[in-house]
Image: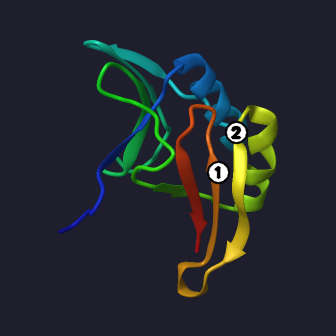
Amino acid sequence: MQHLFIWVEIPAGNMERAKTFYEQIFKIEMPNMQMGDSHYAFFPVQEQLNGGALVQGPNHKPAVDGVTVYLDGSPDLATILSRVNEAGGKVIMEKTYNGNAGYVGMFIDSEGNRIGLQHL
């Protein structure tokens, strides 16, 4: 397998709220697009086969106890975590050293999804 993950979709109950949350904590701009019944806001990435989006649609429901996605916490995930509460989320694990996995942290986003951050 050349790439274990090619695409990830993070469910959003309210796209504008979710988009604002992620743009605020990562200091990014996320382009929008409607595809069928779903609305997408894309994370800006450089590698085509390593991307993802927020998705609001009938088959996408936020959940705190589903699969955990870890997003890139570079260059310092503590900075990203410091913006979470003000943006409408909740930090549930501060920056923690995890041996060979580097640093990790975790938060609940504005939509109720559990999201991890990692930086090697």
Residue in front for this viewpoint, 73 or 13: 13
Q: In the rendered image, which quarter contains the N terminus?
A: bottom left
Q: Quarter-wise, where is residue 3 in the image? A: bottom left
- In this figure, which residue is indicated by the disc labeled 1? 107
Q: Which mark is residue 63?
A: none
Secondary structure under tag 2 reads: loop
The structure residue drawn at horizontal position 58% and vertical position 26%, both measured from the top left corner, is 19
Quarter residue 106 falls in: bottom right
Image spot of residue 41 (x, y percent)? 47, 26
Give the amino acid at mark 2: Gly
Name the foreground residue: 90 vs 70: 90
> Which residue is drawn at the image coordinates 74% and 43% (left, top)?
84
Mark 1: secondary structure: strand
* x and y, in percent, of residue 12 in the image: 48, 27
In the rendered view, tell whether residue 33 sits above or below residue 88: above
- The residue drawn where x is 44% and y is 48% is 46
- Residue 27 image point, x, y percent: 70, 38
Q: Marks 2 and 1: CB-CB under 8 Å?
A: yes
Disc 2: which residue:
89
Q: Amino acid at mark 1?
A: Phe
- Residue at x 73% of width, y 67% of height: 95
Name which of mark 2 and mark 1 comes first in the sequence: 2
Rounded to the nearest angstrom, the CA distance separating label 2 from label 1 is 7 Å
Label 1 neighbour load within 10 Å: few <14, some 14-19, many 20+ = many
Q: Position of residue 113 (x, y in %)?
A: 53, 42
